[in-house]
């Protein structure tokens, strides 16, 4: 259910301090065979020797090729925010994060990047991670049949590249910002594979806390008030814990929702979870 990444350690191939090739033919013959076998030995070590990175990835949770939860053995979580075309919460969110000295992750669309360049610059200056949320915010697969991809690979790749072109003026590249959150937080294994082939790592929020319902409006059937969301998160913590959670909120929501979670509830949540012993860690630290 999870992806394990192994890394090869450092190997020394330095020769002995003294080798008398002229007078020690057997030793020279042995050295020749050892050199020939070295690639095989290294390959064997690569697949059998455990690494700290591999062990750490054992504790992460994957779904359809995307990371949906980080280290489940540590009492820590990561705050992530997405933004498509609204920015009403940016100022308050940045203020709250600064107050609590938390580094979060923001996934932004092309529309947001073009409409609110000053906010992007502020997020960047505050030291938060900024990644792609796609350029045009398309739906990759239907809600009824999530395994049925409804975009072509060419469209997907061009849209992603266009989003990084929009991120480039802020010094953000695919190389230094490889974590990508799909639009609508909806994807399948095909999308994750395409993203991976571009050098991206797909991440998504950890389900079960209803934190992502902070965008809902009273007219929606799935509406949840900020009080309800807060209580759901804390109840989830009490029953199962929040170790490694990627907790998603929105940096902007509809004007119809006057009960904004970021106004006071985000501050309250941070205080409560810290009191319960949780640390808030940056996305790059949670996954590395």
Image (cartoon, helix red, strand yellow):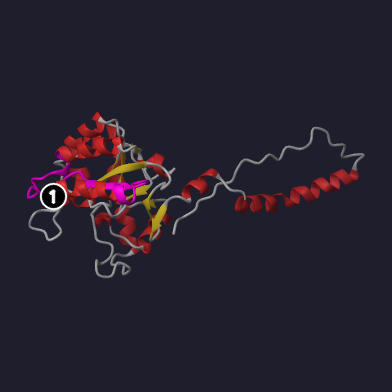
Q: In which quarter of the image is the N terminus?
A: bottom left
Kindly tell me whether residue 176 is visible in this rendering.
no
Q: Judge by depth and name the residue closer to the eye, 32 or 181.
A: 181
Looking at the image, is 246 positioned above or below residue 146? above
Few, some or many C-alpha atoms within 10 Å of disc 1 (few <14, some 14-19, many ≥20)?
some
Q: Residue at coordinates 33% horizontally, 40% vertically from top-left? A: 172
Identify residue for label 1. 225
Q: Quadrant of the C terminus?
A: top left
Residue 192 drawn in magenta: no
Q: x%, y% of residue 63? A: 38, 59
Q: x%, y% of residue 252? A: 16, 45
Q: x%, y% of residue 281? A: 35, 38
Q: x%, y% of residue 83? A: 21, 47
Left or right of residue 142, residue 61 in this image: right
Residue 262 drawn in magenta: yes
Q: Judge by depth and name the residue closer to the eye, 165 or 67.
A: 67
Q: Give the range drawn in magenta.
A: 237-263
Left or right of residue 233, residue 77 in this image: right
Say which element carries label 1: loop
Extreme right residue here? 23
Q: Residue at coordinates 7% horizontally, 50% vertically from top-left? A: 256
């Amino acid at each position: 259910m999870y992806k394990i990444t192994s890394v090869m350690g450092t190997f020394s191939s330095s020769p002995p301090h003294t080798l008398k090739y002229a007078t020690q033919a057997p030793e020279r013959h042995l050295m020749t065979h050892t050199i020939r076998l070295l690639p095989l030995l290294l390959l064997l070590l690569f697949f059998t020797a455990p690494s700290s990175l591999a062990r750490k990835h054992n504790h992460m949770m994957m779904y359809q090729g995307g990371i949906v939860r980080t280290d489940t053995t540590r009492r820590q979580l990561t705050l992530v925010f997405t933004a498509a075309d609204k920015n009403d919460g940016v100022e308050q969110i940045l203020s709250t994060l600064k107050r609590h000295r938390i580094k979060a992750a923001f996934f932004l669309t092309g529309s947001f990047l073009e409409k609110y360049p000053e906010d992007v610059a502020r997020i960047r200056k505050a030291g938060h991670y900024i990644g792609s949320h796609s350029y045009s915010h398309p739906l990759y697969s239907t809600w009824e049949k999530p395994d049925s991809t409804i975009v072509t690979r060419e469209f997907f790749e061009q849209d992603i590249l266009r989003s990084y072109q929009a991120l480039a003026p802020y010094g953000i590249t695919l190389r230094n910002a490889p974590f990508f959150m799909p639009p609508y937080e909806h994807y399948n294994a095909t999308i994750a594979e395409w993203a991976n082939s571009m050098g991206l790592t797909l991440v998504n929020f950890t389900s079960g806390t209803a934190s992502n319902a902070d965008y809902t409006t009273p007219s929606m059937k799935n509406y949840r008030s900020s009080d309800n969301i807060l209580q759901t998160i804390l109840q989830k913590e009490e029953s199962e814990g929040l170790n490694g959670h990627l907790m998603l909120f929105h940096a902007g929501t509809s004007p119809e929702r006057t009960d904004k979670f970021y106004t006071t509830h985000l501050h309250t949540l941070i205080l409560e979870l810290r009191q319960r012993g949780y640390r808030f860690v940056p996305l790059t630290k949670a996954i590395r």
